[in-house]
């Protein structure tokens, strides 16, 4: 192998050879190899890099990794950025040599190296990664635009900025970087960093899906299922896209399909097929599938109940970085499922999920602070965490936060905010929220009194077997308040609520029998209900018993 210095050519000779080699390459003539060899032997770093590329890929000559490495090494030693970048690829990505060469290539101006070096330090030094992505975009490098957009979107190494994220996703997409399509479409769909445009979101997602992007295929299925952007909602068409995505290895699509097969309320139930699909997704590293399969083992859905297997699956998902998994592990520790009950460890798990903005972990941690379970009682911190969870759309947190505003837990009482949150919870279908919203209409709190609306909301809650709704509607039926009096039905609903442990329903039943309201007085029956209410912690019932 020549050492590169045996034949000296003038700079003009080398430039002429390279120009001719470039022309031949454009024509697809591998005679360029011979011309680049002459220039490389004359000491030209660019020609040496070309030779390395020819040998690495078998273009114009036989494929020979050793010769590729040799020519890249010569050019890299001359400070040629592209050669340094290509030579780095011969080393293990965790090695010192890899990082040394990649950094040298980045410093010498290779936008590809800048991007890859940024990715290599993103976990340990996100600020440095952001700077390298930014430098690479100065070279109009589309892949760097994509990663810079993600840095802005997630606030990694810089302040979170939806507008900037959208701008750079758009630049990457316009430069034909295909991986930017899904993110750009989602920004249009959500109105993040730009005006919401569901039709444009569907257009971009459809193109990417047709081009075989499995993530785009999943999202297109979701869009079709929900009728996004003027699409006709079509479950069967959506499922067809989910299947295409799953067949292309998308674990989220596999998990979505599996859930539908297991539940069977939208497509024909096939629990074994659903479990098999979850197992396939787990084997492919899908963390959502790990959690879903864990739930199946925890509840005995399609498999024999096995809490330890469930906890192991949650642990696998947590190790792979799924924030939601920490909430599942926390619940196991909080209630002693397949593990010793340990509130402090549960709180630690919830905190790890909360640090990654998992809404369920935030919600569970807020409840522990509210009760002082496994930690100090801190209603202010509970309110802060519950607010964050509610902002992220957790319906349990939205409902609980309404109660915080209603009762002044960690904040000042604010009936208007409580009412708005109960409305939001109702819109999300939270069963317990209907009756609480009904109470506001029944008593004219924040809104004008509307007994018809209150009754409709109580009935909606009753359809979901809500205890509070049974008590409120039962009381109105007994009294004939805003509705035709129906003592028997009212008593039946009050007993349902009482049997579910509602101490106020027990107290109301005691009062009805004690005072003989709408039926003969019965002190024995009254005492029974008062005792039950008092045993459940109702102080008014204790006072009634003392009076009796």
Image (cartoon, rainbow, N blue to C red):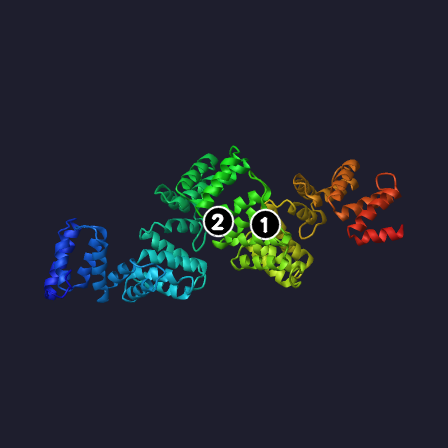
- In the displayed orientation, state which residue is furthest to the top: 268
Picture quarter containing residue 217? top left
Residue 519's disc number? none
Q: Nearer the viewer, residue 111 or 4?
A: 4
Q: Position of residue 103 (x, y in %)?
A: 32, 65
Q: Position of residue 415 (x, y in %)?
A: 66, 55
**Residue 400 relative to residue 484: left or right:** left
Say whether disc 2 or disc 1 marks the residue closer to the N-terminus: 2
Secondary structure of the residue carrying tag 1 is helix
Picture quarter containing residue 347? bottom right
- Placement of 268 over or under 333, stated as above or below: above
Picture quarter containing residue 119? bottom left
Query: How far apart are the two marked residues, 2 and 1, measured between alpha carbons?
Result: 23 Å
Secondary structure of the residue carrying tag 2 is helix
Could you tell me which residue is drawn at 40 percent across and 55 percent down? 166
Q: Nearer the viewer, residue 345 or 233?
A: 345
Frontmost of labels 2 and 1 is 2
Could you tell me which residue is drawn at 77 percent across and 45 percent down? 505
Identify the residue position indicated by label 1 in the image. 395
**Residue 207 relative to residue 301: left or right:** left
Q: Residues within 10 Å of mark 2 (few under 14, many from 20)?
A: many
Q: Nearer the viewer, residue 306 or 474?
A: 306
Quarter of the image with the N terminus in it: bottom left
**Residue 432 relative to residue 65: left or right:** right
Q: Position of residue 213 (x, y in %)?
A: 37, 45
Identify the residue position indicated by label 2 in the image. 287
Q: Position of residue 307 (x, y in %)?
A: 59, 46
Q: Nearer the viewer, residue 339 or 29?
A: 339
């Amino acid at each position: 192998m020549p050492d590169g210095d045996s034949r000296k050519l003038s700079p003009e000779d080398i430039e002429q050879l390279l120009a001719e080699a470039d022309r031949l390459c454009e024509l697809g003539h591998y005679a360029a190899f011979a011309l680049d060899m002459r220039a490389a032997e004359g000491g030209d770093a660019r020609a040496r890099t070309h030779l390395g590329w020819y040998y690495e890929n078998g273009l114009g000559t036989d494929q020979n990794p050793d010769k590729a490495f040799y020519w890249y090494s010569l050019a890299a030693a001359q400070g040629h950025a592209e050669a340094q970048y290509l030579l780095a690829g011969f080393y293990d990505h965790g090695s010192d040599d890899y990082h040394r060469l990649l950094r040298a290539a980045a410093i010498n101006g290779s936008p590809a190296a800048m991007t890859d070096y940024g990715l290599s330090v993103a976990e340990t030094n996100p600020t440095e990664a952001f700077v390298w992505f930014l430098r690479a975009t100065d070279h109009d490098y589309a892949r760097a635009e994509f990663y810079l957009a993600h840095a802005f979107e997630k606030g990694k190494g810089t302040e979170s900025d939806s507008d900037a994220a959208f701008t750079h996703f758009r630049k990457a997409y316009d430069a034909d970087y295909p991986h930017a399509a899904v993110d750009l479409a989602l920004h249009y769909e959500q109105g993040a960093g730009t005006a919401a445009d569901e039709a444009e979101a569907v257009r971009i997602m459809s193109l990417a899906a047709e081009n075989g992007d499995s993530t785009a295929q999943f999202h297109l299925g979701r869009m079709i299922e929900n009728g996004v952007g003027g699409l006709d909602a079509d479950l069967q068409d959506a499922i067809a896209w989910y299947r295409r995505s799953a067949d292309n290895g998308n674990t989220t699509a596999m998990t979505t399909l599996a859930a539908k097969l297991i539940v069977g309320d939208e497509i024909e139930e096939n629990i074994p097929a659903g479990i098999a699909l979850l197992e396939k997704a787990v084997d492919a590293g899908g963390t959502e599938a790990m959690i879903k399969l864990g739930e199946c083992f925890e509840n005995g859905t399609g498999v024999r109940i096995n809490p330890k297997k469930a906890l192991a699956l949650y642990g696998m998902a947590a190790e792979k970085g799924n924030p939601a998994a920490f909430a599942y592990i926390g619940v196991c520790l909080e209630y002693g499922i397949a593990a010793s009950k340990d509130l402090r460890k549960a709180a630690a798990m919830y905190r790890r999920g909360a640090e990654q903005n998992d809404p369920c972990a935030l919600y569970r941690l807020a409840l522990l602070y509210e009760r002082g379970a496994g930690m100090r009682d801190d209603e202010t911190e509970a309110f802060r965490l519950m607010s964050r969870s509610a902002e992220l759309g957790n319906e349990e947190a939205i409902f609980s936060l309404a109660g915080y505003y209603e009762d002044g837990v960690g904040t000042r009482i604010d009936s208007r905010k409580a009412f708005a949150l109960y409305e939001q919870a109702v819109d999300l279908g939270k069963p317990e929220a209907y009756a609480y919203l009904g109470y506001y209409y029944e008593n004219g709190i924040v809104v004008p009194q509307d007994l018809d609306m209150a009754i409709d909301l109580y009935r909606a809650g009753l359809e979901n077997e809500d205890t509070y709704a049974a008590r409120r509607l039962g009381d109105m039926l007994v009294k004939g308040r805003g509705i035709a009096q129906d003592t028997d039905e009212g008593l039946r609903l009050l007993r349902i609520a009482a049997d579910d442990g509602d101490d106020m329903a027990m107290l109301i039943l005691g009062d009805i029998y004690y005072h003989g309201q709408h039926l003969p007085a019965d002190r024995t029956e009254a005492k029974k209900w008062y005792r039950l209410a008092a045993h459940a912690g109702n102080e008014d019932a204790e006072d009634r018993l003392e009076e009796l």
